[in-house]
Image (cartoon, grey):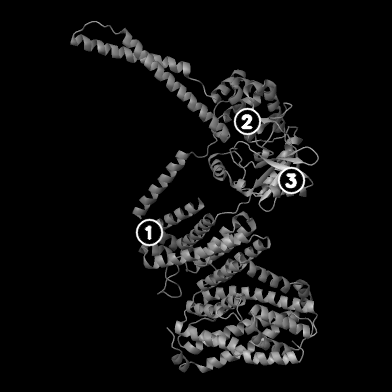
Amino acid sequence: MRLLVGILAIVVLLAIAAFAHGTTSGLEQDIDKGTDQAPDLLIKVAGLVASIGVLLVPVAFAIERLIKRDGLRIADGVLAAVLAHGVTLATDLWVAKGAPDSIQDALTKPSPADLHAFTDPVHGYLAPVIAYMTAVGMSRRPRWRLVLFVVLLLDAFTMLVTGYTTPFSILLTVLIGWAVAYGTLYAVGSPNVRPTGQTLLAGLRHVGFRPVSASREESPDSEHGDRGRRYFVTLEDGPPLDVTVIDREQQAQGFFYRVWRRLTLRGITQRRSLQSLRQALEQEALLAYAAIAAGANAPKLIATSELGPDAVMLVYEHTGGRSLDSLPDDAITDELLRDTWRQVRALQSRRIAHRRLAGDAVLVDRSGTVILTDLRGGEIAAGDLVLRMDIAQLLTALGLRVGAERAVACAVEILGPDAVADCLPLLQPIALTRSTRGTLRKLARERSQREREAVLEASRRSRQAVRAEVPEEPRTDKQAQKQEKQAAKQERQAEKQAIDEALEQAREEDLLTQIRHQVLLIRPTAPVEPAQLERIRPRTLISFIAGAIGAYFLLSQLTHVEFGTLFQEAEWGWVAAAVGFSALSYFAAAMSLLGFVPERVPFLRAVAAQVAGSFVKIVAPAAVGGVALNTRFLQRSGVRSGLAVASVGASQLFGLGSHILLLLVFGYLTGTEKTPSFTPSRTVIAGLLSVAVLVLVVTAIPFLRKFVVTRVRSLFAGVVPRMLDVLQRPQKLLTGIGGMLLLTLMFVLCLDASVRAFGNEEMATLSLASVAVVFLAGNALGSAAPTPGGVGAVEATLTFGLIAVGVPKDVAAPAVLLYRLLTLWLPVLPGWLFFNHLTRKGLL
């Protein structure tokens, strides 16, 4: 339903953009005038916060879900984000190539930085974020939802103020992300969260019971479908138990019915459309304890527990017995009716409303005692309206079994005439439960059928009687015609009289009218005017929608690579610069390592170890070889083994954090160097989605998942205590963080110089931030790739990344080749020499 609503909203939005051109342009002008006065400092701060937050919040939420072992939701979110990104690209292409001019005008506008260019029709970074957060279920987590709402609001504000989007573009982006998320969830499906029998027995043992068996109790379908699955449990010692299990599937049942009741009824409290399992558990437990404290007979709750993350159970003492609906008519005595009303009186004396007083909620045990069950939908501290509804509901439910006279007489005897009379305004079908309304409709159909049969029978008999009275004498033609007319008239009169008599005999008052008459016989002054409970009716809603559509249409009417040539034309000054930056990276790497080692280690030896790491990267995956070499180097330098592992782990952990932070910062700058649009570039979004998909693939393959978990667990063991040691020496910490930032900067400058060496004049407008984003994405993929030095994966990522940011293909390929030559292949020989030297010295 949400998917269909999202698609419908997109269609309506595009229709408005296509036909109401004056409205869209006027709205844009009003927004432009209203935002001209916004302080420039506020815009810049809001843009920076929004750009970082729109990428950081999904990552933080994914980490939180992974910690709670909820990886399937993250997988759904990543899939939705990838699909949303694809839909935005397709939408941008459609708007640019084939959309009507009015839609183009509504979704795009001239770019403030380049009047010959236009803004994006759909924000390719925003729709994937919305799809991701919607698919992972952020709407059920208020804190995360608030943070995301603030971030999205800031982003929309800065984009509108700076003139890089239109209101319709933002709305279309949100709707695409929302619709794609629910489309993905519908296509993927949801896992079966029902707890198994073994889970139920294990949960009972966890709370101190020793169960032998558990059997499912089949009960009639409830009106809401969310009363839980009930089990009869036998124990090794002691009486049996009644166990109610509630899972997330049942929490969602009856959702649309509850939403409709909430919209259509006024003054009647409805429980939240979607409760958490914790809320459902607490509500039912509260009502169970409150009912017993009020003196009513209710199942005694003796234990509660969770059954994993998707189900809870409530353990009651076994009551046994049969429901009122299943009792034969002769078993429903007046004493039984009075006992039922006594239980309701006990609840109402403490302002407790049951809300489901149908026949299946009244249980009669073997001794004839009445017990009120299904208290889950009730409420405490209830208002007068809801308490009176309980009386009206039970009067109707009992009247269906024993008739209006007996039901009213027993209610008046226990509750008093005033309490019964006050419920008459609520004695209307809309105030009753769904099952009771269904029974009343069934009785009404049966009554109508009996009346119809009586009319047909009376009509048949009257015609036969009239025809029997017609004389059988010879007649002339005129006399025959006259007699036939008189006979037909008599037949119609007799038929009408017979029908009236049959209707009078067959007509029965409906049950609600009979109850009112019985109450009025006892309290003639009782109010009978029905209370206004309906806020809206279906007919009113349909009329409003049709009118709105009509008004809208009325208003819309008014208103390829040559290496030889490249190397000959290469700028050797930039090549020399690239060589220098590559060499300086080893000094930065040594700083980033020693900054997390409180013990004294010679700096030049650390530099030599980093050069030796260039040889190790060729024979082992980069992330593994470098970690092993640095750990061994620290151990040989006098650092204890556990502390050496912790230092390298701390360095890697901070390196991961700085990598993500720099990716966010440079992603922000990529959108602002060319234009101050405060939006991450498509390269950033595509890179992040690629990394997310790669992580999902790794975690989905058992061998790779085990390999990564083992390495990470051993890597970060003891990191926290080691960090406490480093924090006592701020100079060391600054050295480590500064070395990480300097290392990234050297690699970025090396790649940038390599690009400019083959296209200096053409690359005059290439921003350093774009190169940084390309490097960070390529480096992340190289670390994850199971090949030595990330061979193959890094080259492909860097080449495609440079092409994506505007570097010609005949420049990107040799530039990446030069960069990898300087940072991977050429250092192998000196790395081998330093590796052998340090090994002979006993330092490796």
Mark 3 and mark 1 residues within 8 Å of each other at the beta carbon: no
**What secondary structure is found at the residue carrying circle 2?**
helix
Label 2 crowding class (10 Å Cα cut-off): few <14, some 14-19, many 20+? many
Disc 3 to disc 2, C-alpha distance: 27 Å
- The local crowd at label 3, few if under 14, some if 14 to 19, many if 20 or more residues have their Cα within 10 Å, is many
> Given this view, does label 1 or label 2 mark the residue nearer the observer?
2
Label 3 and label 1: CA atoms lie apart by 57 Å
- Of the pair 680 and 397, the residue shown nearer to us: 397
Residue 304's tag is 3
**Viewer-nearest of discs 3 and 1:** 3
Identify the mark nearer the N-term, 1 or 2.
1
Query: Label 2 sits on what residue type?
Result: Gly
Kind of residue sitting beneath label 1: Ala
Which quadrant, please, contains the C terminus?
A: bottom right
In the rendered image, which quarter is residue 412 located in?
top right
Q: Give me the disc on residue 538.
A: none
Point out residue 644 in the picture as x, y percentages from the top left corner.
Answer: 76, 79
The answer to whether residue 423 of the structure is visible from this angle is: no
What residue is disc 2 on? Answer: 359
SS state under label 1:
helix
- Identified at 43% across, 67% down, the residue is 92
User: Which amino acid does the dot numbered 3 rest on?
Assistant: Thr
Label 1: which residue?
18
Instruction: Estimate the x, y position of residue 589 in percent, counting from the top left.
Output: 67, 84
**In-image side of 499 versus 573 (left or right):** left
The outermost residue toward the left is 477
Q: Write down the quadrant of residue 698 in the picture.
A: bottom right
Q: Residues within 10 Å of mark 1 (few under 14, many from 20)?
A: some
Task: Tell me which numbered mark, 3 or 1, is placed earlier along the sequence.
Answer: 1
Q: Is residue 761 above or below residue 498?
A: below
